[in-house]
Every structure is written in structure tokens, then in C-alpha cells.
Image (cartoon, rainbow, N blue to C red):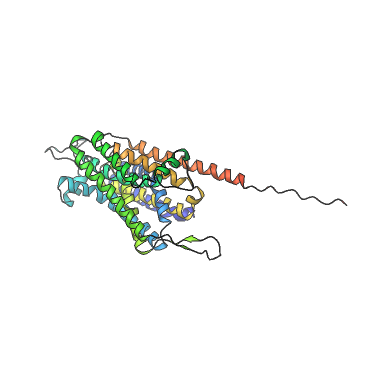
Amino acid sequence: MVLRIFGISFIVTVVSLIAAFLYGGPTALALAAILGILEVSLSFDNAVINATVLQRMNEFWQRIFLTVGVLIAVFGMRLVFPLAIVWITAGLNPVDAFDLALNPPAGDAPYFPDGSASYETLLTDAHPQIAAFGGMFLAMLFLNFIFEEREITWLSWLEKPLAKAGQLDMISVLVAGGGLILAAEFIAPDENRSTVLIAGLLGLLTYIAVDGLGSLFHTEEYEEHPSGGPSQLVKATGKAGFFLFLYLEVLDASFSFDGVIGAFAITSDPILIALGLGLIGAMFVRSITVYLVRKGTLSEYVYLEHGAHWAIGALAVILLVSIGVHINEVITGLVGVAFIGAAFISSIIRNKREGDNHEVTIEPETTPVG
């Protein structure tokens, strides 16, 4: 099963590394490999969240996400999105933006001799708006999770009081909006305050719109199990499936911001970014998502979803702080891995404890005497 799920990702990785080598030699091959590893390390929590949403979709929409959705992730977010930022911020047409990306200034200079900014510089200058949008979208996702009452809690000492606080209407919006105001006032550079506020507000409104539309068309109906066992949740179809698909795409975009921006610390070449982040990284994230769904991992290790959401909360904070303070991508990746790892270990301990509690002691048979 593992080979069947990850086989395509390994093939794509080999082909991508060969393409990188033909494109730029050993250096390009090494950069593409590093970018692929960076994307997987930053996006494992993304895979867990994708799996929680994907298992609510019917087979048709799962296939759409794992095919069309991956194409959008590879070419849309890892190639077109950075170019689009440059189109908008520099007022260049797509051809000139792509030419600018392929022909950076000599050495590490951020500007050309004529004073025009490089592709990397233009994209870095747009980071405050990008971080504000993505940070607010992810913050809303995290806050809606922790302010909801749940039968199973991981960090119970913290999650239970937060769930009680969640009884206050619109508390997620209040907390997220307060965080945005603080980030704009105390973290954002003076010249970026208004754009940070607008971008953050758009991120918040995007989450509310997409999540609201998904809830509008998604009604939780149950059907009897064919064998007479417990009832099963009917998978989302039609409009519900479409809005869950749309939700996943916006979610993937929000997760991609830190990876795309972080990639420029390694290379600004859009071809290598598309090969490393897009083809290698995104394909492995897709495979991890499929593995989690097919193996029922989230049902077996019940705290993984909690750990992923706490990692999302940490990423949201990191994005908002990064509006004015540079944060190393290694820290971003390690925070997510730490939360997922801790949740996984906690799940194993819980399963072992419950298994011990349900052990049945069988008395040895005795042979009657005489």
C-alpha cells in the first residue's frame, strides 16, 4: 500500500531532479532537492488538515482535489503566484515578470545597475501583505477549532477552558481581529500598516466566506451501515463537495506562503522553485494526505488533528510576526514538526492506556480431578 501511494511521488521526484540537473547542473539538482525537503517539512501539518477535510468528501471530489488540486498547488501557488505578485507590485506584464525572474542581477545585489528591483526583492517587499492575508486565514482556522467543544481533548488543561470561552458568539473574529490590529500597530513597518490591515481583513473575510458557504451546503446526514453496524457520515457531494474543494485550495495557498517566501532564501529561480516546492514537495504532501485517509490514521491517532491545528496556530503567529521581523524557515518547520510529533506520541500513549484498560484476563482451564 505504501509503495502504491508514494510510488508516483518517487517517480516525480526522480524526473524533477533529472530535469533540474539538465537545467542547471549539480547545483540546480541540489537546490531542487533542498526545496523539496523544505516544502515537506513545512507542510506536514497541512497534510494532516487536508486529510481531515478530504475524508468528508465523496470519491469524486477526492479525485478532483488529488488531481486538479495538485496541479493548482504545483503551478498556481509555486509558479504563477510569485509571478502574479511581481505583476501587481511592479506593474510588469507576465512576460517581463518571468524574464525578470530568470535573469536576476549579478551576484547578490537586490537591484539592477539601472536601479530597478530584482524579482526576489519585489516579492520580498510584498511579504507583509502576503503574511497578513495568510496569517489571518490560518488564525481563523485555528481559533474556530480550539473554541469548539469536543469530546476528545489533547491539551485538556487549555482546550477545555477555551471551548467554554467559545460559547461567546464571534469570539474567533474578535481574537483574530485584535491580533491583526496589534500586528499592524506594533509589528508592521509604518509604510505598510494600511496594506497589512487590508490584506489581513481580506484573509479573515475569505475564511468566513469559504467556510460559511461550505457549511451552508453541507448538512451532516447519516446512513445505516450495510451490515447493520454503526451509521456512517454521508460524504459531501455536489455544491458541498465543491466548497470543501475550494476551502482546501485556499487553505493550501495559505500554507504555501511561508514555503514560497522561504524558498527565496535558497534560490529565486522560478523553475527550480516549481520543481522543488511544486513537483517534489507538493506531490509528497499529496501522498501523505492520501496515506492518512486510506490508513485511517486520524481515527487511530486521535490527537494528530489537535496537534496539526496547534501547529497552524503557531504558523499564523509566525506569519503575523514576520510582517516586521525575519523568522528563519527552520524555526517554522520545526515548530510544526514538534506539535505533530508530540500529538502522535500522545496518541500512542492514549491507545496503549486504553488497550491496557480493556484487556480481558482469561482464567486458565482446569481439568476436573477424578
Q: Residue 221: tell me if it is visible.
A: yes
- Residue that appears at 42% across and 48% down: 48
Q: Residue furthest bottom?
A: 226
Residue 312 location, x and y as percent? 37, 43
Q: What residue lies at 38% left-to-right and 57% top-to-bottom?
A: 66
Position of residue 324 relative to residue 44, above or below, is above
Left or right: residue 23 compared with residue 285:
left
Q: Nearer the viewer, residue 289 or 190?
A: 190
State the residue in front, 49 or 258: 49
Residue lying at the far right of the rendered structure: 370
Instruction: Point out residue 109 in the picture as x, y percentages from the top left corner.
Output: 19, 35
Give residue 319's position: percent from left, percent from top.
30, 40
Query: Relative to 249, does residue 264 appear above or below in the rendering?
Result: above
Of the pair 51 and 288, the residue shown nearer to us = 51
Q: Is residue 105 above or below residue 12?
A: above
Look at 69% across and 47% down and name the residue there.
Answer: 361
Front position in the image: 329 or 322? 322
Answer yes or no: is residue 269 visible.
no
Q: Quadrant of residue 241?
A: bottom left
Residue 24, placed above or below residue 295: above
Instruction: In the displayed orientation, state which residue is furthest to the front.
Output: 168
Q: How many marks?
A: 0
Q: Residue at x 29, y 42 (%)?
A: 177
Q: Is residue 90 left or right of residue 349?
A: left
Tell me residue 193's x, y (percent). 20, 38
